[in-house]
Image: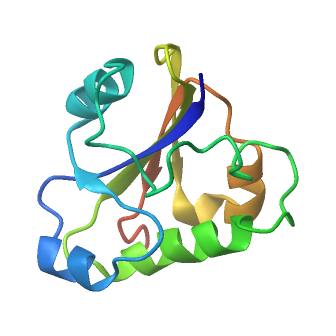
């Protein structure tokens, strides 16, 4: 059994912009409900966030904000702010057969992203709001 990292983005985000940002991690269009069902479905590959077999080696959720890989993941999330019509992203880290047990919502401007990613809990669906908060 393994840990898996999942990623989603709001459905009306510009997919052309998202394609231009293709990197190590992937974010699929989803609603909160569809994303949670996908994560809870043990056979779902659609929302997997990376190309590796499993994410047991990910630094996400290991309580070390300076660990190799955290900054790259945080930079990838920050780059998503350039996607037109982006409102939120979803991330979750879950053991293969576990289900989502809780949800948390934060705004990207209110968190220290590397620290936040280092403290991600297993089996929690995180919504990171990306919209411009101040005008």
Instruction: Please count the marks in the image.
Output: 0
Whether residue 102 is situated above or below residue 14 in the rendered picture: above
Residue 84, x across and y down, in percent: 21, 78
Judging from the image, the colouring scheme is rainbow
Q: In the rendered view, does 89 fall on the left or right side of 100?
A: left
| In-front residue for pair 14/112 | 14
Quarter of the image with the C terminus is bottom left
Please tell me which residue is depicted at 62% across the width and 59% down the height of the picture.
110
Residue beneath the point at 55% across and 28% down:
94
| Residue 123 in the image: above or below residue 126 | above
Q: Nearer the viewer, residue 19 or 135?
A: 19
**Percent x, y for residue 49?**
43, 52
Q: Is residue 93 left or right of residue 13?
A: right
Image quarter of the N terminus: top right
Left or right: 133 in relation to 87: right
Q: Position of residue 127 (x, y in %)?
A: 44, 43
Image point (49%, 14%), residue name = 97
Position above or below: 81 against 26: below
**Does residue 135 show up?**
no
Against 99, is 73 above or below? below
Q: Is residue 60 shown left or right of residue 47?
A: right
Q: Is residue 4 visible?
A: yes
State the image coordinates of residue 98 (x, y, percent, origin top left): 52, 14
């Amino acid at each position: 059994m393994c840990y898996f990292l999942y990623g989603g983005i709001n459905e009306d985000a510009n997919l052309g912009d998202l394609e231009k940002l293709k990197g190590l991690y992937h974010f699929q269009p989803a609603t909160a409900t569809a994303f949670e069902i996908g994560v809870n479905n043990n056979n779902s590959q659609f929302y997997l966030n990376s190309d590796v077999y499993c994410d047991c080696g990910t630094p996400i959720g290991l309580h070390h904000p300076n660990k190799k890989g955290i900054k790259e993941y945080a930079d990838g999330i920050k780059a998503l702010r350039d996607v037109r019509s982006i409102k939120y992203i979803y991330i979750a880290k879950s053991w293969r057969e576990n289900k989502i047990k809780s949800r948390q919502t934060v705004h990207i401007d209110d968190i220290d992203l590397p620290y936040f990613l280092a403290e991600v809990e297993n089996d929690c669906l995180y919504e990171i709001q990306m919209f411009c908060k101040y005008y």
